[in-house]
Image (cartoon, grey):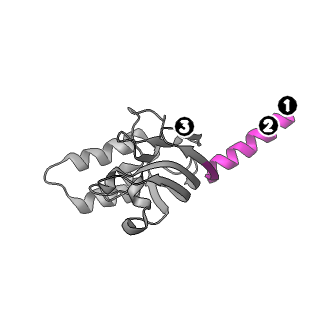
Amino acid sequence: MRKLGAALLILAAWSARGQTLEFSGELRAGETYSRKLSRGLVFCLTPNAEEVGWGILVSTKCLPDAPDFTAIATPPYHGPHPLQLIGFHFLPETKLFSNVREFRFVLRDKDARRIGELLNQRPQDAARVLDLAERLGKGRGEVEILEADAVRGEPLYNTKLLRIRFRAKLTIPGRGEP
């Protein structure tokens, strides 16, 4: 019984401090990667609908209908996005992004809905949306693409990623933080 009490005390201390996870993996076209995190969250790399790469997602599950806790807290909200790992992003002549993608994520569905409601208002108050995303986007992450094999497409945005090797680091605040 004393061992169980000590283990629970260690677990409680860990959840109060938060969690930083570092991991790596490799994917081939069409594959999904998932990694369980704390607070009921899951990190996902999911194939995109156009089959040219993957999307970075933190959610409660790695399914198409899952709430997106990442895109809602990671501007820009229109145009090329750091959460998209698309083939032509990795061609030497089209360096839209670096191989390191930094992002934020909210920790609860209700926070994602709050930001989403502001984004859907017309006219949009961009400063208010960004402020709320900053305050509620408590989780932080980084995905570094170490290797990417692509088949060039015509036009370039049809370039398809065949394989990626990546390293990820995610930080999730402790239970005491909202």
The residue that mark 3 highlights is: 40
Q: Amino acid at mark 3?
A: Gly
Q: Amino acid at mark 1?
A: Met
Q: Residues within 10 Å of mark 1 (few under 14, many from 20)?
A: few
Whether tag 2 and tag 1 are in contact, CB under 8 A, the answer is: yes
Foreground residue, 37 or 178? 37
Q: Position of residue 158 (x, y in %)?
A: 34, 50
Can you say whether 46 is above or below 23 in the image?
above
Foreground residue, 45 or 105? 45
Mark 3 and mark 2: Cα distance apart in space = 23 Å
Q: Residue at x 39, y 37 (%)?
A: 67
Mark 1 and mark 3: Cα distance apart in space = 27 Å
Q: Which residues are magenta?
A: 1-25
The residue that mark 2 highlights is: 5
Count the labels in the image: 3
Is disc 3 placed on a helix, strand or loop? loop
Q: Nearer the viewer, mark 3 or mark 2?
A: 3
State which tag comes first along the sequence, 1 or 3: 1
The residue that mark 1 highlights is: 1
Is disc 1 placed on a helix, strand or loop? loop
* Quadrant the N terminus occupies: top right
